[in-house]
Amino acid sequence: MSADQPADEQFLRVFLQNEEDLRSYARALLPTWEAVDEVMQESSVVMWRKLDQLQAENEFLPWAKVIVRFEALKARRKAARDRHQFRDEVFDLL
């Protein structure tokens, strides 16, 4: 990324520019908007930690989608292990 601006400003700017696309992508992977909110929060922290791996600003969206995908898979695995997690059919009946 560019050396003209501090890293936190650059990250915030490019993240906000792509947040809607990332949320839409996360929603395609997850069953609820609540899950999307949690995954987006975790993903943004991971992105911030790994920002030094990003080579160019125009590569942000594909790079961020990989992180969102892994965080979504992690969230789905965690939900699947939860014994108190109802299947969609049970919610429909309720």
Image (tube, grey):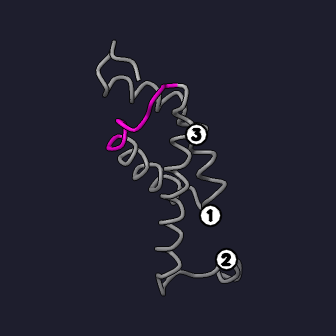
74 in relation to 65, above or below: below
Residue ranking furthest to the bottom: 83
What residue do we see at 53% from left, 80% from top? 85
User: Helix or strand or loop: what does disc 3 sit on?
Assistant: helix
Residue 30 in picture, x, y percent from top left:
60, 61
User: Helix or strand or loop: what does disc 2 sit on?
Assistant: helix
What residue do we see at 37% from left, 48% from top? 46
Give the alpha-carbon distance from disc 2 to disc 3, as whole Å.
31 Å
Instruction: Please tell me the numbered disc located at residue 83.
Output: none
- Mark closer to the chain start, 2 or 3: 3
Residue type pointed to by label 1: Pro
Instruction: Please tell me the numbered disc located at residue 31.
Output: 1
User: Helix or strand or loop: what does disc 1 sit on?
Assistant: loop
**Residue 49 placement, left or right of 21:** left
Give the alpha-carbon distance from disc 1 to disc 2, as whole Å.
9 Å
Residue 94 in picture, x, y percent from top left:
65, 81
What residue do we see at 47% from left, 55% from top? 39
- Residue located beneath label 3 in the image: 62
Q: Give the crowd class for mark 1: few <14, some 14-19, many >=20 residues within 10 Å.
A: few
Magenta residues span: 48-57
Res. 22 image quadrant = top right
Residue type pointed to by label 3: Pro
Quadrant in which the N terminus is drawn: top left
Secondary structure mostly seen in magenta is helix
47 in relation to 28, above or below: above
Instruction: Please tell me the numbered disc located at residue 88.
Output: 2
